[in-house]
Amino acid sequence: MGALKNLFFLLSDEQIEWLKFLQQDYQGYDPLMMTEYLSENREIQESIERILHLLQEQKRQPELTVKEIQEIIETAFQRQEKRMLAQIQTIVEQQKKTPQTDMELERKIKEIYEYVKTQKTPQQPVIPPEVTARISELENQVKGYQRYYEEFHKQSFLLQQANQRALALEQELSSVRAELERIKLERFKEKEIASKEQKEESKKARKKNIFSITKNTEQYFICPETFNDFIEKVKNTRKLEQFFEEVPEENSYQKYFRRYQENLQRMIKKLEDEAEIEDKMNDLVKVIQNNLLKKLMVAIYRGMKIGEATLEYRLLEVLNWYLEEIGMYCRESIKVGKILEDKDYEDMELLRDDQTPGKAHGEILEIELYPYYLNYVDEDGEREKVHTEGMMIVAG
């Protein structure tokens, strides 16, 4: 009866009812044949024992889930149930054909039925609490691993995007650097070319007389009626002011220019409207000579003799523009290497040099400052000129 004792693992409620039917309706049949057949049937016995073995294995293998055990039991039951029922039905049919009055059948069927009835037929195996806890723990770990994987996948994707963006930025940066290097090279070349051009201009300037301006030689636009307009031109030193904005305040050139502005304003305030134009022109020329020419122009000339004098060349260009704007020009007949003329004594201050050998007496050695002229028309309509005094060095 070892196999029959465990038969409840396979019997359903329907099968228990069927055994009850056998007890009621077939009390005279031979129970020995039925029980021996059931107990000696190797296939049913092995199936029952295999199910019991799996249940024991579940205790040693917590990783097997309840669902997996249920599937194993149900598969085995389905495979054997029909076969067992068919065999029991065959026995019943045989017993019908061979009537028996032995009360043993009733006793055996009652024994089987009562045994089965008293047993709690499990619909599913009872899982120990520690196994259930272990299953829950593993399921939570799986969920945790799943969340970790999802987060890792997300971070990996973001990292990949960041790497791609960083690579793109690196390429853009390389392009920008290359463009900056190209611009630097171009600017360097431009500066180099400008420096060469400036040097060439300086050389040309040395060869020609850059101090002599002759634009207004025949111009007579100053007269009593236009004198106030002329004064406004003289006061307009904006271009010189812009130049000196880039020059340090302690620079001597800037100091000479500021002094000229102050004395010019002072002189203009003293001008009287009733005064003749000749007196006004002389007063104006005196301020230009003493503050602008003998100070600033001579300093520029001497600065150029020392070196490259880039600042001096730029300042001379702006100063010549200003003098031409107000109508001044230089006497052209003065040339280095020529001998003094009577005219030179009228508008030049002569500095003698008797230390230079091989030079003729009265030969012009150097012109530090040209005389500057201004043409105007007086009250009588006569064309007149007023001039500053120049400076030259002559031999002897």
Image: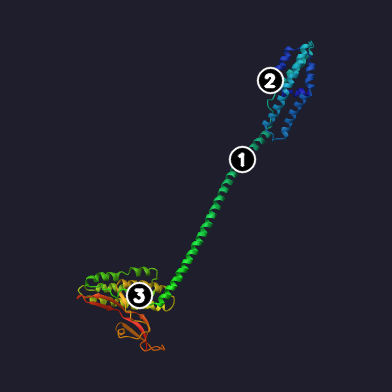
Q: Residues within 10 Å of mark 2 (few under 14, many from 20)?
A: few
Q: CA distance from mark 1 to mark 3?
A: 87 Å
Taking depth in this image into account, of 29 and 206 the one nearest to the observer is: 206
The answer to whether marks 1 and 3 mark residues whose Cβ atoms lie closer than 8 Å is no
Amino acid beneath label 1: Gln
Q: Position of residue 23 (x, y in %)?
A: 73, 14
Amino acid beneath label 3: Tyr
Upstream in sequence: badge 2 or badge 1: 2
Q: Is residue 309 visible?
A: no
The mark closer to the camera, 2 or 1, is 1
Q: Quadrant of the N terminus?
A: top right
Of helix, strand and loop, which one carries label 1?
A: helix
Q: Is residue 168 visible?
A: yes
Of helix, strand and loop, which one carries label 3?
A: helix
The answer to whether marks 2 and 1 mark residues whose Cβ atoms lie closer than 8 Å is no
Q: Is residue 49 above or below residue 318?
A: above
Amino acid beneath label 2: Asp
What's the mark number on residue 146? 1
Q: CA distance from mark 2 to mark 1?
A: 42 Å
Taking depth in this image into account, of 278 and 42 the one nearest to the observer is: 278
Q: Looking at the rendering, which quadrant does residue 215 occupy? A: bottom left
Badge 3 is on which residue?
256
Badge 2 is on which residue?
13
Q: Residue at x 54, y 52 (%)?
A: 168
Left or right: residue 189 versus residue 101 is left
Q: Position of residue 237 (x, y in %)?
A: 32, 70
